[in-house]
Amino acid sequence: MTTAIVLVKIASGKDKQVLEKLRLIEGVTHITAVFGRWDLVVDVEAKDLQELSWIVIAKIRKIKGVENTETLITTSI
């Protein structure tokens, strides 16, 4: 299992639409709204790095209103 935190920047006024689409993506396990440079912190689980890349590139980044993302692959310590 590969897990990651995806930081998401949303275009002004597109918050609700982006949240609705994110909630439908298989692999998205939790979404937190934050204040600062990023608007959302999205927890993602995938079977491997290839699937994680697919979720971020083909699904999250394709949502209208998503301006930018940064993916942080996580590890247990």
Image (cartoon, grey):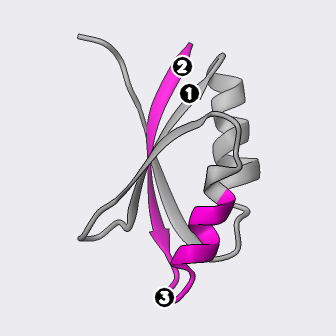
Instruction: Please give the residue where the numbered disc 2 appears in the rendered image.
Output: 2
- As helix, strand or loop, the secondary structure at mark 1 comes to strand
Image spot of residue 72 (x, y percent): 40, 38
**Which residue is outermost to the bottom?**
13
Tell me residue 56's x, y (percent): 63, 46
Q: Residue 58: x percent and y percent?
A: 76, 50
Q: In the image, what residue occupies the spot 68% across and 61% down?
A: 21
Asked if labels 2 and 1 touch by Cβ distance under 8 angstroms, the answer is yes
> Image point 38% across, 68% down: which residue?
39
For numbered disc 3, what is the local secondary structure?
A: loop
Image quarter for residue 50?
top right
Q: Secondary structure at mark 2?
A: strand
Q: Is residue 52 above or below residue 5?
A: above
Which residue corresponds to the image point at 64% horizontal and 64% vertical from the top-left? 20
Mark pair 1, 3: CA separation: 27 Å
Left or right: where does residue 23 sit relative to residue 42? right
For badge 2, the amino acid type reads Thr
Magenta part of the protein: which range? 1-21
